[in-house]
Image: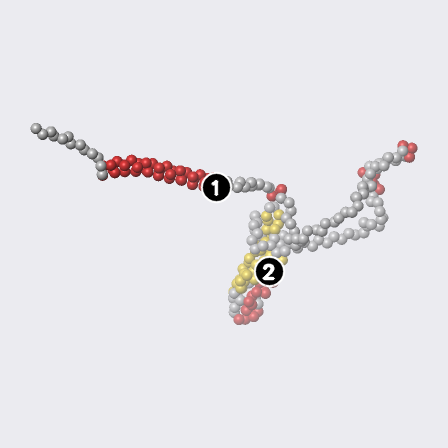
Amino acid sequence: MSAIAPTVTTKYGAYELRGLYQKYATRALIFAAIFHFVGIGVYYGAVYLATEDEPVYTVRIMKYSDLGPPPSITNSQAAPAVSVTGAAAKPTVGTPVPVPDAEISPEATIMSQTEMQQIGPVGDPNAGTGPVSIEVNIDDGPPPDFVPVEKQPTPVKSPPPAYPEIARRAGVEGTVWVKIWVDKEGKAKKAQILKSDAELFNQAAIDAAMQWVFTPAVMNNGPVAVWVSIPFKFKLNQGR
């Protein structure tokens, strides 16, 4: 009777390599993840530490009245420094000096304002006498083209222009727009031609415009100078 030998199964070859592969692959994955996390953490930590805080600017708001006068445009050079060699002397005017009581006159008194007015000014008796002439020459210049007003000037005297004889003989008609400077008294101070249909009428229109009188323009309860535009029409069947 023959004996049957037992069957023995031994792991070798692909089975052993498969077990080692799973073991070392898991370890490599864990080490790689730890390495990447450490590297990313070091990078962002370095960026955070290298970032500088933004500078803080302090803004001081001042009123216009607190500002000093602006520097001169014409005189940009600083004034030369003046050196003082000696000590400044003390002022002597107005310094009280003690006087003995024996030298004081009991009749000395201080004049009142009424007594000083009765005496009058002290000095040259001829000074301040005679007629006094004061000349005031105020020329504000022409006003700007647009002046805000509360009340526009109204013509109170508007003589028509004289029709030029040359234009009358030639049978020429037209219109001249004149720009008149009306001063604070309502008088025409200057006239300019804005537009003209014919140069024959320009001088006649200017001469008539300088004779116009207006009520002054009013702004803030006071007269102001303004420009007004007046059309002068020249027609053969009308005076203006």
**Image mark for residue 191:** 2
Quarter occupied by residue 178: bottom right
Residue closer to the observer: 84 or 118: 84
Residue located beneath label 1 in the image: 50
Which residue is rendered at x = 80% and y = 41% of the image? 90
Which residue is rendered at x = 42% and y = 41% of the image? 43
Q: Is residue 117 visible?
A: no
Residue closer to the observer: 172 or 220: 220
Q: Is residue 173 visible?
A: yes
Image quarter in which the N terminus is found: top left
Place of residue 126 in the rendered image (x, y in percent of width and height, measured from the top left): 84, 50
Q: Residue furthest front?
A: 1
| Cα–Cα gap, marks 1 and 2 | 75 Å
Residue closer to the observer: 166 or 126: 126
Q: Earlier in the sequence, mark 1 or mark 2?
A: 1
Residue 76 left/right relative to 196: right
Residue closer to the observer: 235 or 131: 131
**Image mark for residue 184:** none
Please rate how many residues cluster around mark 1, counting C-alpha atoms within 10 Å: few if below 14, some from 14 to 19, many from 20: few
Image quarter in which the C terminus is found: bottom right
Numbered disc 1: secondary structure = helix
